[in-house]
Image (cartoon, rainbow, N blue to C red):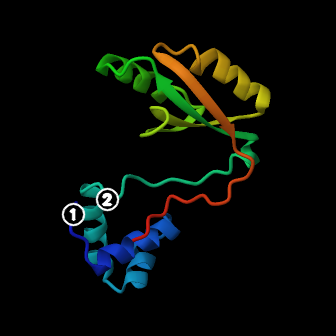
Amino acid sequence: MAELDEFDRKILAALQRDGRMTNVALSEVVALSPSQCARRLQRLEGIGAIRGYGAFLDPAALGFGITALVTVTLEKHARANIKEFHELVRVRPEIVECLAITGDGDFQLRIVARDLAGFSRFLMEVIIPMPGVATTRSHIVLEQVKATHALPI
């Protein structure tokens, strides 16, 4: 973990609020010169503290009416099975998040679909037949109470 000072934390917090902020605007917010701010920003990107920049899209506005959380349990925990599962998950755009978890199940998938029928097809035709999948348990999201990628800097 890299050492972050107060200015680094201010830069990260400001970019979490507005990732499109210009370097000049960012330098004003954190009270550094634009050149100092640019150097710090480059360092934060270089050490991996900033993984990238992007837009937060609204799934419903884009026609994705269903979000589901699917817990997947694998038959065997051999390295080859896990690697194959990872590869299959990475190529499916419907799976927007995959977390290796403890407790009940091995992986938690967040899947988006246009409608319930589309989710059902995806689950039955893609997830359940995946090699190495023993069981799945699905939960349909009724309401998203909070959504953020912002970390408590």
Q: Quadrant of the N terminus?
A: bottom left
Q: CA distance from mark 2 to mark 1?
A: 8 Å
Identify which residue, 37 or 83, lies in the foreground: 83
* Position in image of residue 79 (x %, y %): 30, 21
Q: Who is closer to the viewer here, 67 or 108? A: 108
What residue is drawn where x is 60% and y is 18%?
A: 126
Left-right relation of 141 to 8 = right
Q: Nearer the viewer, residue 127 or 63?
A: 127
Rendered position, 5 above or below 49:
below
> In this rendering, would 129 be left or right of 23?
right
Check the image and report above or below for 72 versus 112: above
Asked whether the residues under the numbered discs 2 and 1 touch, taking CB atoms below 8 Å apart as contact, a structural biologist would say: yes
Left or right, 93 with reference to 80: right
User: Callout 1: 10 Å neighbours few (<14), some, many (20+)?
Assistant: few
The residue positioned 30% from the left and 58% from the top of the image is: 45
- Residue 94 locus on image (x, y percent): 60, 32
Residue 37 x, y percent position in the rendering: 31, 75
Which secondary structure, mark 1? loop
- Amino acid under disc 1: Ala
Q: In which quarter of the view is residue 77 placed?
A: top left
Task: Look at mark 2 in the image and give the residue it sits on.
Answer: 49
Neighbours of disc 2 within 10 Å: few (<14), some (14-19), many (20+) = some
Disc number at residue 137? none
Report the amino acid beneath label 2.
Ala
The image's mark for residue 2 is: 1
Image vertical order of residue 136 relative to residue 62, above or below: above
**Residue 118 visible, this angle:** yes
The single residue placed furthest to the bottom in the displayed view is 31
Residue 20 screen position, x and y as percent: 50, 64
Q: Secondary structure at mark 2?
A: loop
